[in-house]
Structure formats: structure tokens, C-alpha cells
Image (cartoon, coloured by chain):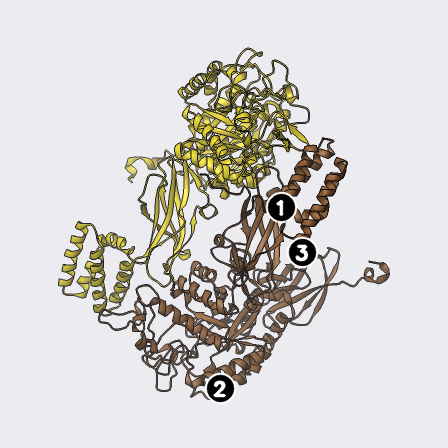
Chain colours: A brown, B yellow
Amino acid sequence: MITYKSPLVIESVKPSLDNGRYPIKREVGDTLKVTAVVFRDGHDIITVHLKYKMKYGEDKWHETEMKPLNPGLDLWEGSFVLEKNTPYLYTVEACTDIYRSWLEDTTKKFNAEQDIKSELLEGVKLFNDVIQFMSEKEEKEYLKGLLMKIEAANTQDSKLKMFSFDELKHVMKKFCKMGDPAVFEPALEVYVDRVKARFAAWYEFFPRSQGKDATRSATFKECIERLPDIKKMGFNVVYLPPIHPIGVTKRKGPNNSLKAGPGDPGSPYAIGNKEGGHMVVEPGLGTIDDFEEFEKACRSHGMEVALDFAINCSPDHPYVSEHPEWFFKRPDGSIKYAENPPKKYEDIYPLNFSATNEKWQALWEEMKNIIIFWCEKGVRIFRVDNPHTKPIPFWEYLINEVHYVYPDVIFLAEAFTRPPMMKMLAKVGYTQSYTYFTWRNFKQELIDYLTELTKTEMSEYFRGNFFANTPDILPQILQEGGKPAFKMRFVLASTLSSVYGIYSGFELCENRAIEGKEEYLNSEKYEYKVWDWDQEGNIKDFITLVNKIREENPALHLYKNLEFYPSDSENIIFYGKITYDLKNIILVAVNLDPFKSHESNLTIPIDKFGIRSGETYELHNRITGERALCKGEKYKVRINPEVEPAHIYTLEKWSHRETGFDYFGM
Amino acid sequence: MITYKSPLVIESVKPSLDNGRYPIKREVGDTLKVTAVVFRDGHDIITVHLKYKMKYGEDKWHETEMKPLNPGLDLWEGSFVLEKNTPYLYTVEACTDIYRSWLEDTTKKFNAEQDIKSELLEGVKLFNDVIQFMSEKEEKEYLKGLLMKIEAANTQDSKLKMFSFDELKHVMKKFCKMGDPAVFEPALEVYVDRVKARFAAWYEFFPRSQGKDATRSATFKECIERLPDIKKMGFNVVYLPPIHPIGVTKRKGPNNSLKAGPGDPGSPYAIGNKEGGHMVVEPGLGTIDDFEEFEKACRSHGMEVALDFAINCSPDHPYVSEHPEWFFKRPDGSIKYAENPPKKYEDIYPLNFSATNEKWQALWEEMKNIIIFWCEKGVRIFRVDNPHTKPIPFWEYLINEVHYVYPDVIFLAEAFTRPPMMKMLAKVGYTQSYTYFTWRNFKQELIDYLTELTKTEMSEYFRGNFFANTPDILPQILQEGGKPAFKMRFVLASTLSSVYGIYSGFELCENRAIEGKEEYLNSEKYEYKVWDWDQEGNIKDFITLVNKIREENPALHLYKNLEFYPSDSENIIFYGKITYDLKNIILVAVNLDPFKSHESNLTIPIDKFGIRSGETYELHNRITGERALCKGEKYKVRINPEVEPAHIYTLEKWSHRETGFDYFGM
């Protein structure tokens, strides 16, 4: 027996990621615009609906009608608003609009003066079918009444007029589904994050280095005192490297040396000792209550804590004795430390996530429980260390499980590796990702990379969190370029992406590196530090100003709206961000050379902004406060990195005209 | 319980159409090159295999190893030869190469002078696992013997050397699959057609017009006499409009008039009368035996018959009385004729393919049986009339069923409609499609359209059969441009696409149209005709020559190898086709203006052809026979449409050099 399939074809439903295998991402408040190619054989009229519902807790689909976007290509479009921080499903349904097809054909015949007696009888039959089908009593009664009138009417003309009543169309569309509906399968998914997934400014610090005494760990209580300063600069995420007890066995000393002295704190990434593991706070920082107090203090400043989830166990981690089966073993039964031959990491025991660990499920669950534990303490943001060294199916499991309970959790993937793995981590659920931004310094490579991030399929699921530096990366440009480079890279990070971060010390232009490497000299990773947060040469005012500009301009809250515009200097990059309603227009010109002034002729795409060529508009440089009245698309700049390496303009239309007065009407 | 999934990720397996929903197409003898993105977490070494088998009749997969194509992007490549005219399945399998991962790590440690005692014990364990797993006795014995030697060896060095034996690698790769293999799903499909699906020259004629007597139908016997002429011109497919009995009720007269005179034969597209329907031959043409004789005569000339499959029933078709339930009915029970309101087609009753026909399955099967019937008579090519007015699932059913029995059947879709439907018909199985070629006359529109056909995803499944004219389309350019236009369009059709066709009369430059329309005046569709096939002004010699050039040059047998090259005249289009081994290089310059001579500076991409800038090469104009010695990439042409509207060159390298002599060595 031949299987029945609807004659309606639904294809190319977009956006869609790998044919629906992975969800796309959006943020609360976004409108999801969906297009689809829908058609059938012959010339019958079809109706197309966009259907959507929350993945959890909603059984019934909502529906909204899709409109023809390009009939010549059978392209349809519809949209709906994503109101909640939760995953939604969406799909497309189509059916033949039997009634409208009949009505149009019959009307054409009538207009060509053909006899439509037989067609009107068909109409009556269709009407009766619809009445049969209707469940709503009121509609049913209306149709019955109308049908009696139609049958009583004397002329074909008057019958056809009643069949054509506008109010019928809605009722008849419902009826279409009796026919041959096709539904696109599988339904697609969009994960709707909260807005902070897209728009945030991260500040990373080592909590133990926030005090005044370099011989001991600073405490969470001392960290609380640092918060007003961070808040004032305009940050809203405070990200802490691991806060757990640190291993003693094979502890690393200053500058990653193999032997720690008696007072050396060790790397916080070698997690676990007799005090406990991933669910415990390092005693030097305080108690779990102290952490919760710190977390609340952040919230009271309008900031959130981001914790580091580093799946590293020191040889002293409780798992080693409690779950030796979770680790890799040598033939003699001893546990293996981490290696990347010939390099050895003797202070870390890797966990075995694969099925060669017979208790792998228990390990996976325990990892999930760690995240849930900190969620219960109020944390909703996790930066995950080296996710690319754990299996992809593990992350898909963990993130889905956590999101089922806490849909507001943000996961940032710290995977510096080849593109396919970075993309895959984002596909299986990571909210944000570190990027190659730190190594993109020159004009074309920045344009190419940002275009890939914001204009290709990647923009559907991969949000790049642009860190200007990290404890592991002090880029060459910052080592050599001094204050102008720090300011320049800060503007790039914070305006190219809507979500970015710095690691503390950046505001002090800290640039002492290990010779020939991208690593900090005397890194905080292995030492207690005390900083003068107001020391001479700091750029805190600049950071504060740029964060204020970000805050005040909704165009900078968006990620995918980045556009590059022509600039005739190789050293000056020019780009813009505009809100979709064109009300907020930001233009940014950055001198990428921290050593020298450069000039450039910028081309401002006034057409796109709705400005006519003869019209005057204002460029307001938000960095310097200067204003300029302009006409046409050419604009010349000279950018001196010693003064300010970047211009951030708002473009304002000169909107007040005499035609705006009341007495001109309208 | 958490479900186990392999940590290996296999993505972007290409070529692939709509994630494997539809097969791609290739031809017998092609090499299918497959790429995939494959990776896993961590730094273990992985092995990737391309697997393939015939869809029917092969249970076991063949395997070929894939090689890294771009390791930085985790991109792998493999290929296999498509030997048979049948559908194949292919997919990608990957696993962690446990042994090689262990060996590389251990070797690195050994080279760094670390003690590898524990690692060698691991190696022995791995070896024992492999021995356990092996089924081939010989290999097993070899491994056992080798292991004994390894264990007996004195030094770590000598043990490691034995573990590193090259011949082990192959054995150990088989063993990988014990680990964590991942297989890409679903397996993808490639439909392998015979070469004629890609390379053929079609000639269409009305068999009833192939005689000498305009008062009656010519017969198949008379048609046989026409074959040498068609063969001589270089065609290899003879395509006939419907050959079945023609309806009498509402028969159309000359020029589609509503009333046929007593001697009028009617349109062969109004199929069926008391003599029979789609499985019967119109008596005027002869008997079914006569048809079979004609079919054999074509084969004896190295040509094949293509039949027209037009699902149209005249009111006199036997189906009307035998299966009235297959048709659309009015409320009074009478059968509806075809309409496109307000137009009426009273000589045709459409069939109801939808589920509102309760016996739709029987109808679908009957349609399939029609094709099978003609296959049994030797026919293997069907041109399908108006497929876009029947449901897509119907075609998918019919073509799959026919191909299961006769994989060599070629289906040509005559769907002149919007792009999504045309593409979908190809996706669900049509071997070839008519195109918009007849309406693409100018340079950029030709380049754009051909680029879409040959360089986008369409080239994976859509083969455009370029008809220069059809009984329904006499394009304006042919109506107005005279002989130069006919020659010009002929060269375009036959060299832009590897498969093309003309409708008889083209060789006579027949261009009498109905005023203001693209239709032939006094069309053969409604009348008996007698033609003088050698009448003055014919272009048969030109057609013969171009078909000979096509035959002799393998580059013109390919479809996707079309490349456009620069030409500085808007009227002269310049393109090339090259075999993948670069041995056959064809260049074509066509003057698109049939009214006037034009000059152009052509740019020949000698780099691509492996010619250095100072090197001399030869352009041999195959139309005129002229030869030219050239250097560099610039070449100037003047094309006079009255002489020849196109140049078809072979580019030949001047390959005999003194360095070729033996005494130069190499």
C-alpha cells in the first residue's frame, strides 16, 4: 500500500541549525522572524502558519499566519516574540485553502459571465462540510444562518456575494486543516537566554589578591570592599577563577615552577585537598557563607558572580580516594597525572569521561551536581575551563540538565582550539565562547573574523565574549603598545562585541610578560598579590566612559548588528552599530596602530541611515564630547593614539524642522 | 540512565542534499569525492573511513580510508568510483586510533628520555586485547609471535621498535572499531545514472509529420526512413510527443481552434479514445509492433527513443468509463474538464491524484504501470508533460518504483514554473529538467543562470536539458534573428549544457509565429505536416559540425565544468569547458547579437591551463578550421554573425620541446 503524504511541500525553514539537530539562540524580548519555502502542485491557494510553543510546560501550539515574502520564489514569512527565558519549539504548517481556492475560481468564472450554478452547489457542500467540522457553537450558528440566506437568495450574484463575506475567511481557514495539512518536521528549537547572555561587561579578578597583605589570601569580605570600584567602572559580571581548596601534592610555585615554597598558595586550577573539592570554598577565602554574602553583595551592586568550572583534580582531591575508578590508571594500579607528552602536569589528575570508566554515568552526574550546587548558592554564570578536552556528548548532557532546572544559567566556553570544536561546543549549548579576538590585531583580519562571527550561520548560535586579556594571555600588542594599545583594544572588545571582558590589571595597563611569551610575569595564578588599584597611569576613567557609552546606547547592546564601512587608511578601522529601528546610530573609528597618528577618509553610509545627500547631520564624539555638523558621506579623521586611539560617535539627525510645527499639519 | 554517545563528532558530510533527505546525482564512471569535518575532544589520534555500498543487493559496506584535507579545520577527504547505474549509499565512520595514540605518546616520552616501563606494559595489554579481538587466524598468529618477541626483548628501545612496525598499523586500525566508533547518520544517497543522463543530443519530432502525404498521419515505418538523416546530424535521442490514440470529443482544430474539421488529427496531448489510452499506439502511426520496430531501428542507429508521458485524458479515454472515480466530479455527478478559470480545456479531463479520490492508490499504480509497460517495449527515456500539476509525493513514488526495476530510465521534467517546484521535481528523482534557457538571451543573464545551474547546490541534483525550441516555445530571438540566431542559440544550447535538444524545424530555421506570441503558426500540434528536410537555408551542416565537435571533445561531455572568462564586449560571451585532467580544453566565444558584428578582447586563463606567460599555444577554431599561435592571456576576436556567430576553439599546448628528448634525461 502506498503511504499517504501531503502534496504541500515545506522546505528551507530558516533560521535552522544543522537541520534542527541543534537549537539556535536568541534573547528574551527578541522577535524571531521565520521564513520558509512552501508550495504545492497546481494553482490552488495555500495557507501557511508559523507554530510555536515553549518546549517545557506548554502542550498547545500557538499559531500566527505567515505572509508571502516573495511569491515568485514561494517564500513565506512570519514572526513571534520570545517572551521567556526558556527553550521554544517552532515549525511551519501549511494547507490548501479549499474555500478560498473555490471562491477565487468561481468569482473568476462569474466575472467572465460563465454560468456558476454548479460551482454554487459546490459552495453549499463546502459550507455544510465546514458546519460539520466547527466546534464553536457561535460560529456554527452563524454559518448555518448564513447558509440558509444563501440558499434562499435568488441570483447567482447575491449568493456569491454572501459566499465572499470577509468574516468568513477566518472561519474557513480553520477548516483548511481538514484537508491535506503538511507540518515541517522535526520542529526546530530556539534557546532563549536572558539579555545578559548577549550584553554584559565582565571583570575577572583573583579573590585572594584583593587585599592589602601579600603574605596571605585576601578574603571574600575584603573582596566585597573592591566591588564599588568595579561597579563604578561599569562592569556587571565579576568573574572569579576557582575558589576551591588547592592541592598540596606537587603544588606549583611562582611562575609555574615545579616546587612551591611553604608560603606559596599554588594554582587555584589544581583543585581539591583534605578540606574538600569542587563544592567547597578555600578556607583562606572564607566560608561558604562568606561566599554567599559576597554573591549577595555583587547583586546589591547590580552585578553578578561568574564562577570558574575547572574539571581538574589535584592528587589530594577527595574524588581520588572516594572514586578512584573515575581516574586513568597505570598497569601497576596507580593513578595517572595529566600529560601532553613529553610535558607532564603532575599536580593534576585527569578524570576519565569515556566509557572505559565503568562508572562514567556517576561521574557525569557528579559534574552536573557541582553546577547545581552553586546554582543553589545563587550563581547563574559559569566560565568553563578547557571544555574541549571533555567529550561533546557530556556537555550536551550537562547543559541540558542544568538548563532544565535553571534556564537562566550562562555557560562561557574557554576553548582555545580549532574552529569545529569551538563551534560544536556552542551548538550543544554553551551560551558564550571565548574567541580568537586577542590574536586579531590588524584591519582585514578583524573585519574577516567579525564578519564570520556576526554575519554567517555562526551568529545563530555562537556568541563571542571578547576578552582583551586573560590570566593566560597577555597579547603582544599590549606588551608593546603601552597605554594607547590598552585603550585601543578596550574599545575594540567593548564595541565590536556586545559582551566582553577584561582581567584585572588591564585597567592599570599591566604588561610585564615572561620574555618571548604571551604570559604574565609573576602571574597571580601562583602567588598572592597586592595591587594599588588607583596607581598612576591607570585608564579607569576611560573604561568608565566607554562602559557608560555602551550602557546609554542600545545599538551597542546588540551583537549581530555590526557593519564595517570604508576607511581608506590601512590603520584605521571604521564600523557601526545601529538599532533595528534606526533610532540609535553608533559609529566607531579606531586607530589600530598604537605608535603613530593616522588619517583616514571615512565613508558614512548615510543612505542606510535615511539621510539624504544634501541633509545636515551631527556627529557627536562621545569620547571627547566634540560635536561636528556634517553633510554627505565623506568624513575625514585624524586619530592620535596618544590622545585617544578611538572615536565613538553617535550620529544624530537634525530632526527639528519647520515642517514639524503643528501649523504645517500632519 | 544517561545514554552513551561516541565522543567522535562527524559533521558537514558533503556532498549532501537537504541533510540526506534526497539523493544527489552522478553518472557511471564518476569518482565521488566526499569530505567531512571529524574531530573529538583531547589530542587522541583518530581514523576516518568513507563507507559505501549499492542501495540494493549489497549488505556489506566497502571502506576506504579518508585523509586529512585541512587538519586545521578537521577536514577529511575520501573518494570512490561509482561503477554501476544504480543508487549507492555512503557515510563516514570514525574512531579513536587507540594503538597509534598510545604509540605516538610513548615514542615522544622515550625520545624525551623518560622511563617508559609502565607505557610498555600498557602496550602489551593493548596487544593482548587486539589478539583477543582478531578473527583472522594468520594475523592472530603473527601478533602472538611478535608479542613473544617483544616480551623477550631486553631494552625499552628494542621493544618500542617492534611496537612501531609498519605492518602493525593496518591490523591495529581494524581494532580501533572496538573502541568508540561514530557513524554519520542517516547514510547519504547518490543516484548513479548512465552517462546519457548527462551527455546527449535530443531531436524532437511529430511522427505523424514525417511522411509525404499531408492528408494523413505518417507511420512509424515512414519515421524509420527519417532516422539516417537525424543520426547524420549527430543526435542520439529521438523524442516523440504522445503516440497514443487521440480524443474525438471537443477535439481541437488548427491553431488550437475550438472546432476540428473532419480531417483534423487533434492534439496528441488529448489522449485516449475507443482504441485505447496510454498503453496503446494511435492506429494512424501503426501497431505496437510497428513502434517496437521503430524503437529497434533507433537503437540500430545508436539512438534511443524518448516517449512523452502526458497525464491527460480526453473525454473518450477508457479510464473515464472504467475508473470514473479517478476524476473530479460536479455536484450533478458529471466529470469536470480541465480549467484555469476563466480558461476552459474541454478536450481534457484531469485526474484526481489527491486523497479526495478514494482510489488514489490504484491511480498512482496505474501511472507507474504505464511507464513499466513502455519500458518492457524497450523505452528507457520519458519526457514528462507538466509534472508540476501533480503532487510531489506521487513523482517520488513513481520514479523510485520504476528505478527499482529499471535503474537506467531517464525522466525529463517539463515543468516551466517557479524555481522551488522545478528544483523539488529534480530532488524527488527527475533525471533532467527543462530550464529557463530559452528566455536567457543576454550576457549577464546567461552567466547568472548558468552559474546557478552548474556552480551552486543545484548542480548536485538538477541537470538542465537545454532545448533551443519546443513545439510550445518559438523564442523571440529565433523569430527575429534569422539564421544567425538559430546558429547562435544552437551553439549556446549544445556547449553551455552537455545535454540539449531541438525540436524539428529548427534545422530549417522555421520561425513563423502567431503574431505577438512565442507560438508556432499552424503548429504541428494540431495538423498533419509534410516537410522538405533539405530545403534551402537549412543549417544541417552546421548542426552536424557542432555535434561532431561535441562528440570528439570530452570536455563537452561534462556538465559542471563550465567556467566563464572575461570578454570586454557586452555582446560577446566567452566561456570554457575543461576535462579534470586538463587534457581537453574547449573555449567558446559567441556573439549574442544576431544582427551585427562585434569585437571583443577575450582573456584566456592560461594559468589555469598550466601555460606560462611566455609560452606559445595554439587556438584551433573548430568551426572554421583556422589555427592561430598565441602567447599571453589576451586574445582579440571579431565575430560576424552572418559568417559564423560563434567560435569554438580547442586550446592545444605546444608540447614538443627539446627537453622531451630522451637524452635530456628524466
Local crowd size for mark 3, using a 10 Å CA cut-off: few (<14), some (14–19), many (≥20): few
Where's residue B660, x and y in %?
33, 36
Please tell me which of labels 3 and 1 falls first in the chain.
1
Q: CA distance from mark 2 to mark 3?
A: 51 Å
Question: In the image, is residue A232 above or below residue A342?
Answer: below
Answer yes or no: is residue A68 visible: no
Q: Is residue B379 left or right of residue A630?
A: left
Where's residue B473, x and y in %?
60, 27
Q: Chain of mark 1?
A: A
* Residue A328, image quadrant: bottom left
Looking at the picture, which amino acid does disc 2 mark? Gly
Looking at the picture, which amino acid does disc 3 mark? Lys
The N terminus of chain A: image quadrant: top left
Q: Which residue is mark 2?
A: A211
Q: Chain of mark 3?
A: A
Q: Nearer the viewer, mark 3 or mark 1?
A: 1
Q: Secondary structure at mark 1?
A: helix
Local crowd size for mark 2, using a 10 Å CA cut-off: few (<14), some (14–19), many (≥20): many
Do the residues indicated by labels 2 and 3 lie within the same chain of the protein? Answer: yes
Q: Which residue is mark 1?
A: A132
Question: In the image, is residue B300 above or below residue B593?
Answer: above
Q: Chain of mark 2?
A: A
